[in-house]
Amino acid sequence: MKLFVTGGAGFIGSNFIFYLLEKHPEDAVLCVDALTYAGNLETLAPVMQNPRFRFVKADIADRAAMYALFESEKPDVVVNFAAESHVDRSIENPSIFLQTNVMGTQVLLDACRKYGIQRYHQVSTDEVYGDLPLDRLDLFFTEQTPLHASSPYSASKASADLLCNAYFRTYGLPVTISRCSNNYGPYQFPEKLIPLMIANALADKPLPVYGEGLNVRDWLYVEDHCTAIDLILRKGKPGQVYNIGGHNERRNIDIVKTILAILGKPESLITHVADRKGHDQRYAIDPAFIHRELGWLPQTGFEDGIRKTVQWYLDNKPWWENIVNGEYQTYYERMYGNR
Ligand SMILES: NC(=O)c1ccc[n+]([C@@H]2O[C@H](COP(=O)([O-])OP(=O)(O)OC[C@H]3O[C@@H](n4cnc5c(N)ncnc54)[C@H](O)[C@@H]3O)[C@@H](O)[C@H]2O)c1
């Protein structure tokens, strides 16, 4: 099978490519990535020489470029990870989120229609469901939960999901969608909660926590997300949405304290900053459907996963130090400097 994987120089896409090339020796991957601030070609260094892997720098919203690639490469399957993915950046500047996440998805769907594929898979997020109240721990997102996005990021992802459903219903395009909870693991860009806190703690810098840090996120080790997508590609049903999560809800403040404890750093580094606008309170996935239909279950528990993740950031300092010391520093000052 030849897979057209977009956004593969980012966090989850790169982990997926590593997983896939290892797990399926008969498959080949064409990775298409625009290498925005979040894409890092260094991440893909371990597979660059692999004859079953090829990288092309291109924007998924560039119709001519996408059509040319589909025509020459004739992929069997498309997995779309490419997106603007950071909620805070979407609050600052929503436009690029609509351009990439919505228009880019449409271009890919059109290319799939024009050139034919066996499957188009859209990597979506639980954030399309909005949030749950902190005092109703009995509530979870199921595949039937109405879309109720809160941020420009989640609104753009929800729009893309609707478009995917429309292409399935209208044109019969074999589309699947997965909506996963928060991921953590190797190669995550250090603007996201877990790597940000690890990097700051290691530098003895303040750890900026929004508000009281009581917001709850449902965490999944990135490899478990990859196994779920792989299963959906091979055994999932076109037209179907699959929620992915491991019932691992944690308050942000507890995540930060866990990281400090692993690193042996003091909790006095925690600094509470003004809350994010429209901050979602709680995300919680009900993964019963994917378990029942496809037999998927997560393999990495949180205690194990967070230790492995911290160790990875300790072992791979040059990877994230290059980012933290570069252009990202200007953005960091803007976000946390005056809060
Ligand atoms: N990180 C999470 O916790 C999480 C959870 C659920 C779903 N998701 C979804 O998974 C996908 C991947 O997330 P991530 O955390 O790996 O994101 P990321 O920001 O680390 O990576 C995104 C990648 O997409 C590339 N990209 C951006 N715009 C592009 C464009 N126009 N054309 C081609 N490439 C482009 C970037 O260069 C980058 O390599 C996203 O669709 C996101 O919505 C993420």
Image (cartoon, grey):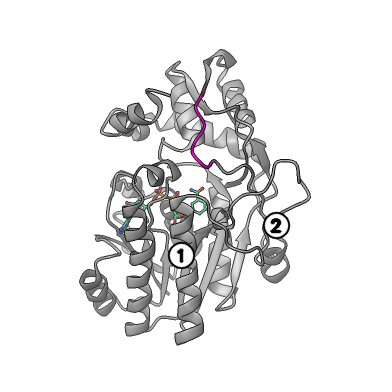
Q: How many marks?
A: 2
**Tag 1: residue type?**
Ser
Along the line of sight, the residue nearer the viewer: 173 or 304:
173
Q: Quadrant of residue 303?
A: top right
**Mark 1 burial class by Cα count in 10 Å: few <14, some 14-19, many 20+:** many
Give the quarter of the figure containing the C terminus: top left
Task: State yes or no: residue 52 in magenta.
Answer: no
**Rendered position, 334 above or below 20:** above
- Residue 90: percent from the left, percent from the top? 39, 47
Q: Which residue is mark 2?
A: 286
At horizontal 58% and vertical 67% (from top left) the residue drawn is 231
Coordinates of residue 12 in the picture (x, y in percent): 46, 51
The quarter holding residue 73 reads bottom left
The residues colored magenta run 273-278
Q: Residue at x 38, y 29 (%)?
A: 317
Q: Is mark 2 within 8 Å of ligand 1?
A: no
Residue sitting at x 56%, y 60%? 179
Give left or right: position of 103 versus 22: left
For label 1, the SS is helix
Residue toward you, 5 or 99 = 99
Q: Residue 216 in the image: state x and y as whole percent.
A: 64, 40
Q: Give the structural element (helix, strand or loop) at label 2.
A: loop
Q: Is residue 61 visible?
A: yes
Magenta stretch: dominant secondary structure: loop
Q: Work out whether 335 lies above or below 227.
A: above
Cα separation between marks 2 and 1: 22 Å
In the picture of the structure, the residue carrying the numbered disc 1 is: 159
